[in-house]
Image (tube, grey):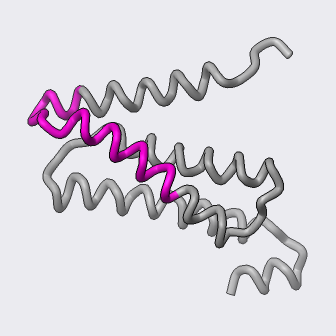
Amino acid sequence: MVPPYAAVTGNAFPLTLFTRIVILGMAATSLNLILGHGGMVSFGHAAYLGIGGYAVGILAHEGVGSGFVQWPVALAVSGLVALLLGALSLRTRGVYFIMITLAFDRCSTMWRLASIPMGR
């Protein structure tokens, strides 16, 4: 109901609001799966959401505007990174798992900050 309303009224705010609600809902669902059902405290799961967002942003910047292309690419890139980092942290348990996921999250944040051109 929101996209037709936004198209008729020309007001893009509700569409932007509900898009953000869906994205944050996906993040909350991933935290529920990891912490609630899996019993593992993970600080790095938000990095995979960000990696998928970067994949979509890069594709949109390159002119690929179809969500049917962007969505599978974001899933594949995030899944590949999760597979690589998961293989590294597979043998850790307890507080060590928490620390390694926190380290991966901080590394992804520093990578994002280092990719922003400063002073231009």
Q: Nearer the viewer, residue 76 or 49?
A: 76
Residue 98 in the image: x percent, y percent? 21, 33
User: 62 above or below 117?
Assistant: below
Q: State which quarter of the image contains the C terminus.
A: top right
Whole-percent x and y of residue 116? 70, 24
Q: Main secondary structure of the magenta part?
A: helix
User: Range of the magenta residues?
Assistant: 75-99
* Quarter assignment of residue 21: bottom right
**Image vertical order of residue 83 relative to residue 16, above or below:** above
| Left or right relative to 27: residue 33 | left
Please name whichever residue, 23 or 89, is drawn nearer the observer in this view of the structure. Answer: 89
Count of numbered marks: 0
Residue drawn at 80 percent across, 49 percent down: 62
Q: Which image quadrant is residue 1 in? A: bottom right
- Quadrant of the image occupied by residue 22: bottom right
Q: Is residue 96 above or below residue 3?
A: above
Q: In the image, is residue 40 part of the stretch drawn in magenta?
A: no
Q: Position of residue 20 (x, y in %)?
A: 60, 60
Q: Is residue 60 left or right of residue 46?
A: right
